[in-house]
Amino acid sequence: MDDTQPWRRRTLLRRAGTGALALATLGAAGTGAASTVPDSGAVADRSDSERNPAGDSSAPAAALDRQSTVSAGPSRWPQFQADPTNSGYTETLGPTEASTAWTFDTGAPGQATAAAPGTGTPTGDPPDDPTDNVVSSPAVVDGTVYVGSNDGHLYAIDAVSGEEQWRYGTGSDPESREEVMSSPAVVDGTVYVGSHDARLHAVDAEGGEEQWTFDADGAVFASPTYRDGVLYVGSQAGTMYAVDTAGEEVWSASVADRVDSTAAVVDDTVYVGRWNDDRTGSVVALDAESGEEVREYAARGRVACSPTVRDGVVYFGDYAGVVYAIDTGTAELVWGRQLGGQVLASPVVVDGTLYVGSFDETLWAMDASNGDIEWSYATGDQILSSPAVTGDTVYVGSSDERLHAVDRANGRERFTVETGEAVLSSPAVTAGAVFVGSSDSFVYAVGDPSGGESVSATPPADTDGTGGSPSGTPDTGESGDSQGTTSDGGSGFGALGALAGLGLGAWHRIRADGAGGADPDGGDGGRE
């Protein structure tokens, strides 16, 4: 985020920017385009192309060995959205009821950020809200939760007890701590995380000592993606970097005016969203070895969303409120769906279903092959949090100050957990537990973080006088009426379909609106 972005995030949370548009011809795919989208239910794709050959009994164990440091498992959620493909999926089952094991306070609010000159910041709105503390999404590795805070620190927290193990400060000195909105990636004993001090930090996972820092050309809001000894991360000056684990630059490439998107790395290709000052955007594919642009996937608005790739299709959303499925080889649109608000959260595709949240306050489940709505679940406010999906549950945060657990099969509420502020952070799931940050400055552990083992440590006491852990709301056992669950959403639009009746004139008026007015296609990238 640039210096105005925390301010804009709070502004956007109060608005439902739902700019209308007519999506005419994003691609020229033929009538068979939809066949490129997976329609089978194999749950096997969490680690890009490393699939198990049929009949090879040794392959599962070998694949697990290769993937264990970068993919989710019973005690691991090692980077943003679980793995290099941003799959957001784990076979591990999380908690089944609203039981808060502990909360951890990351401390004093983050420092206010001044508006940058020439940004057209509207007048009459509040400055940066200092309570937006934990926007970073946790990584969990072998009993430790790693998470950034807007107080300028990276924290290591014992997953079972909630006790601080260490903290690491970013910025040039204790008086100039810079926000850590980036989500950590934890690999082979090192934690990698970006900061608004325009650096990528490598920190010893056990003791919290600095190993090295890498200077970028702008604030690092995006999360680093680790794959095969290289970290891929973008800056808010619009540069994508490939950095090796020694802190040396492999390559850099200018791809946009700003990069808020966390890259998905699949095979030999890096996919990342473009955010441009002229309100245009797309997803660009870069060669993982050289950084050269391979292909571009067109969108109608800026793309802060972190894309995910599944079986030759890249899925993402944009500020125009459209969800896209695009063939990675031909760059032709397979299908698209217009939602009622901006799509900043990363989509998750599992077993032929796409799950994604939107500024229209809704978590959507769509058929990944054609965009048809399977069900929808209404929260009480906009969704910037990216969902975490298990075998039976979708966990997602909302600006309604809750973590929501939703039945994956039918969209009914399982439970919710109240926090003290908006949940912009994306949840991380391990066996029996889910971890998430909130803008109230706390990190929450829900369920049983011991993974079924007895908990010997005592959760931290309430130190702020608010009464400790918020209460959870259990599932009522009804059909989701309290959260507006529906299943009647209709179909998506195809590659050649014009989206009728959406008010193209209104869209043009919104796009022409000056900086002093509502900006449905601008503002903060939110949580990837």
Image (spheres, rainbow, N blue to C red):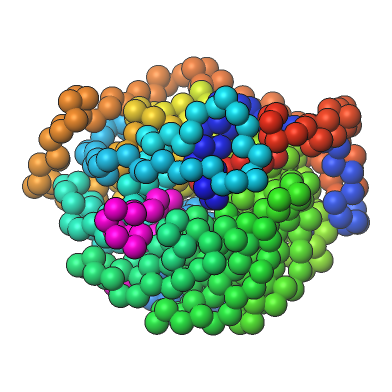
Residue 502 coordinates in the image, percent (x, y): 84, 29
Viewer-side residue, 327 vs 128: 128
Magenta region: 169-190
- Asked if residue 89 can be seen in this view, the reply is yes
Viewer-side residue, 256 vs 288: 256
Residue 227 coordinates in the image, percent (x, y): 49, 73
Q: Residue at x 62, y 50 (%)?
A: 304
Viewer-side residue, 315 vs 522: 522
Please give the count of numbered marks on the rendered protein.
0
Residue 106 coordinates in the image, percent (x, y): 27, 44
Viewer-side residue, 146 vs 215: 215
Residue 213 among those drawn in magenta: no
Q: Is residue 144 above or below residue 24?
A: below
Name the magenta segment's main secondary structure.
loop
Q: Residue at x 48, y 33 (%)?
A: 127
Residue 454 coordinates in the image, percent (x, y): 13, 47
Q: Residue at x 38, y 67 (%)?
A: 201
Say whether residue 84 is left or right of residue 512: left
Q: Quadrant of residue 101?
A: top left
Say whether residue 74 is left or right of residue 197: left
- Asked if residue 435 can be seen in this view, the reply is no
Say whether residue 356 is left or right of residue 184: right
Q: Is residue 489 above or below residue 160?
A: above
Residue 176 among those drawn in magenta: yes
Q: Quadrant of residue 68?
A: bottom left
Residue at the extreme front of the image, as rendered: 117
Q: Is residue 60 above or below residue 172?
A: below
Q: Residue at x 18, y 51 (%)?
A: 164
